[in-house]
Image (cartoon, rainbow, N blue to C red):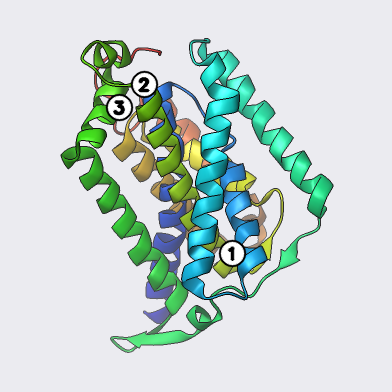
Amino acid sequence: MDRLVQTLVDAVSVGGLYALTALGIGLIFGVMRLINFAHGELIMIAGYAVLLMFDMPVGLVVIGALAASVLLALAIERAAFRPIRTADPPTLLISSFAVSFFLQKTMILFVGSRPKGVDFLPDLARQVEIAGIRLQLLQIVTIVVSAILLVGLSWFLRTTRLGLEMRAAAENFAMAQVLGVRANRVIATAFAISAVLAAVVACLFVAQTGLVQPRMGLQLVVIAFVGTVIGGLGSLPGAALGGFLVGATTILLQTLLPPDLRVFREAFVFVAVALVLLLRPQGIIPARGLKERI
């Protein structure tokens, strides 16, 4: 029983991280029709901000990670994506790859490619007892933080004026602009929110692994993007659900598969992805309405 509960907690914890990552990707795609693979570098820069400031109080470290990620996201939007905003989706996709590789190689040039250890939030490594079952505090915190952010973002999009403008832009950007929605503000806000999600993912990921490296966001983004496709491109609930399912499935397969087959865990995940897309190519929660390119 203890092992089953621990496995489920592991799955929910990892699934929450992938859900937050997928939500950051889905948010930009919904508003701008851009699959932003440079989202991984927002996670990376926040991780290095943690490394740089980890001797400071935890609150300042988190604020520094948030600031670094948001500033980089706004700079990317302004310098790389705004000038080509009206380009077709393949051009935007290639641009996101170019930005991602440029930031990775630049970071490698300055700090090297070797992983660096950082003992961030060591107090969360201890175990706590809940209903007679011992669980790692970090996993519980990850689940709680992920749930709070998902609920908070849902509230923001449904109740605030800016959130409603972002939803309108995701449904039909051209019509939203006619009705007075300002493109620059909506897109910059979407990038800033995705950067906040990336910074939170980075803090939790660094606390779990104790490592920072220039490619630390790459695997998270690739798996999260798969989750976004499964959930439904352009659908934020779908992105969150798809990211969660893919992340949770990887942990469950790691536990349930025989030892000889665990090395093929990702293969089983992608087979499952292929089956889902064959049966439901529009995703689990397809986006509503026709979305117009900016």
- The CA span between labels 1 and 3 is 33 Å
Mark 1 or mark 3, which is nearer to you?
1
Amino acid type, label 1: Val
Amino acid type, label 3: Pro
Circle count = 3
Mark 3 or mark 2, which is nearer to you?
2
Tell me which label, 1 or 3, sits earlier in the chain.
1
Give SS at disc 3. Answer: loop
- The CA span between labels 1 and 2 is 34 Å
Closer to the camera in the image, 146 or 4: 146
Give SS at disc 2. Answer: helix
Tell me which label, 3 or 2, sits earlier in the chain.
2
Specify whether 219 is left or right of 275: right
Q: Residue at x 47, y 57 (%)?
A: 200
Mark 1 or mark 2, which is nearer to you?
2
Residue sitting at the far left: 159
Local packing at callout 1 (Cα closer than 10 Å; few below 14, some 14-19, many 20+) is many
Give SS at disc 1. Answer: helix
In the image, which disc is placed on residue 286?
Answer: 3
Q: In which quadrant will I find the C terminus? A: top left
Q: Is residue 49 among what the camera can see?
A: yes
Q: In which quadrant will I find the N terminus? A: bottom left
Horizontal and vertical percent for residue 93? 58, 22
Local packing at callout 2 (Cα closer than 10 Å; few below 14, some 14-19, many 20+) is some
Q: List the residue tagged with mark 1.
A: 206
Q: List the residue tagged with mark 2.
A: 183
Relative height, residue 206 to residue 25 (above, below): below
Amino acid type, label 2: Ala
Tell me which label, 1 or 2, sits earlier in the chain.
2
